[in-house]
Image: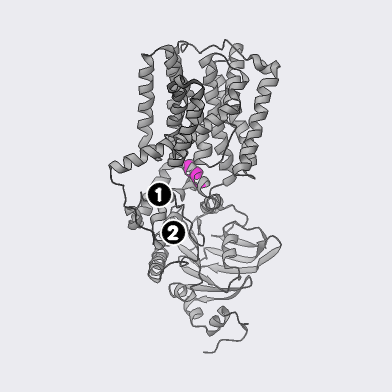
Amino acid sequence: MNQPHRVLPLALVLLLVAGLAGSVLKPYPIYLISLWAVYTISAIGLNLTLGFAGQISLAQASFVGFGAYATALLLPHGVPFGFTLVIGAAISFILGVLLGFPALRVQGHYLAFVTLALATIAFLVFRNESWLTHGTAGIDKIARPIPFTSDVAYMWLCLAALAVVTLGVWWLLRSPWGRAFLALRENPVRAASLGVDVRTYTLLAFAIGAGLGGVSGALFAPLGQYIEPSEFALPLSFSLLLMVVVGGSGSFLGPFLGAMVSVALPEVLRSFQDYYLLIYGVIVILLLVFSPDGIVGIIARGVARLRPTDAPVEPKP
Amino acid sequence: MATDTNSPVLMMEGVVGGYGRMTILNGLSFSVARATITTIIGPNGAGKSTAFKAIFGLLNLSAGRIILEGKDVRGFSPAALIGEGVCYVPQGRNIFPELSVHDNLELGGVALGTTKAMRSRVEEALDRFPILRQKARAQASTLSGGQQKLLEIARGLIARPKLMLIDEPSIGLSPLMVKDVFATLQRLRDQGVSILMVEQNARSALEISDNGIVLETGRTRLVGTAQSILNDPRIAKLFLGAEVDLETPASP
């Protein structure tokens, strides 16, 4: 499950099935499938930063926000959607590099607090700088790019973007860059002895993760056609973090499954009304107690039981 | 540019450096001949492992030159040194235990730049070490101690080094495993890799080496063929920590 080359076809089939199902469903499920694709892109970014490079970030929602605001603010000025997406991703990428600098000095909980600070600052900017962001009133009537104006067409655009990101990350993880991220997560000192430039790769881990957050935000804004600051506040950062952890941090398929749970579970538990969050919380706790490697861990163990392992595991000497 | 096969692959010239204000290497000078095994021995604190860190760019040096194939590489980063053909197998267990054997080998190729080069080098390594091919998908922590050391050596070879720095390869291994690791080093030497080794297990190491270097307090005290050092009665004294008068010739 952690081998990108083995699960890539599975991820792409999942996208196709979601798209085909969405094409015959009602508008609300179509919206949910689009939202899943958008959140998955962001979770894939965070999974690169956290799961593969081992750097915690609570600022992923801010990068989604930068992408969303860049698109929402530039589209009315006639800038094509493709450019707004690139600009949103570039802004997030650059801010991601800046966020990476503290990670060169602090790690773990301390790094979490640094990223928390950035998330708070970003939220305050989105909310208080009304001259630019329209403040709490938000920005409405965000146009979808032609010809993706219908719900179904826009869903296919989101799924296509997710497919491109999936292929890009698949390539990255198999490349020496991806291997360097892995070395960095496992042991930075050993990584350095293998010629990994720890500084560059730490910054890149943040920047690429943030850049994907920006892509996700650029797609998010025209999806609901309205954005406001609280959508990019800490709850989204925690939610994205949960998607990565629940799905399986450091696994290729984890973000797909984590985002699916995060989008679908509120709908499934809708009848429980106020108890929804309580039930969701209990499910997450149970999952992490019994399967710290998330849903992917459960599936991997299930698959391993069904077939013998590639190589026999020998007892340690 | 053709390389002079008689010139040393590595020359240390008056290298001074240490940790913070503490100087460990006090003008260290020695050379490593091409396609040989050279073993550095010396008492604890002599600066053996520090010499490796100096060569591999992990130590700030205040003086001296480190000449690799005629080029001064002092101040080069580990990544740049890997590009220049140096690999470093540090002391102790340095595998990534949670990852598979195959993933560990791929990590040896992160400095190569392309996925294709990385993958073909991993295949070469698996051909060279059939035991690792057998266990390619197994978690690296499930390998025996000797196999883990072979994995580290194989990983170091992914970058096709001219010079391998290997620090205490026998540490924590059974005598049989040590034999296996040393035989691998001899095979690599025969294939043209120059090996500079630090070893506490001095006698066994010198027995498979071509040359030896004795370090004391960050200086070279004795260089010679491995055989001459093995036969030098003063070496035993040095390892016992006794004062040694190296000015007086050894008794025949």
Give the numbered dot on residue B100. 1
Numbered disc 2: secondary structure:
helix
How many circles with numbers are drawn on the protein? 2
Please report, as a chain letter, where disc 1 is located.
Answer: B
As measured in the structure, the alpha-carbon distance from the residue carrying label 1 to the one carrying label 2 is: 16 Å
Q: Main SS of the magenta segment?
A: helix
Q: How is the structure coloured here?
A: one colour
User: Quadrant of the image for the N terminus of chain A?
Assistant: top left
Residue at 57% of width from left, 30% of height from top?
A237
The residue stretch that appears in magenta: A178-183
Give the residue drawn at x 37%, y 28%: A12
Of residue A285 and residue B216, the one placed in the foreground of this image is A285
Q: Residue A70 vs residue A249: left or right?
A: right
**Residue A248 appears in the figure:** no
Residues A198 and A24: in front is A24
Q: Position of residue A232 (x, y in %)?
A: 59, 24
Mark 2, residue position:
B153
- Which secondary structure lies at badge 1? loop
Quarter-of-image position of residue B19: bottom right
What amino acid is at disc 2? Ile
Return the x and y of residue A98 as percentages of the image width and height: 64, 35
* A92 relative to A146, above or below: below
- Look at discs 1 and 2 and give the one toward the viewer: 1
Which residue is at 57% across, 34% downward? A207
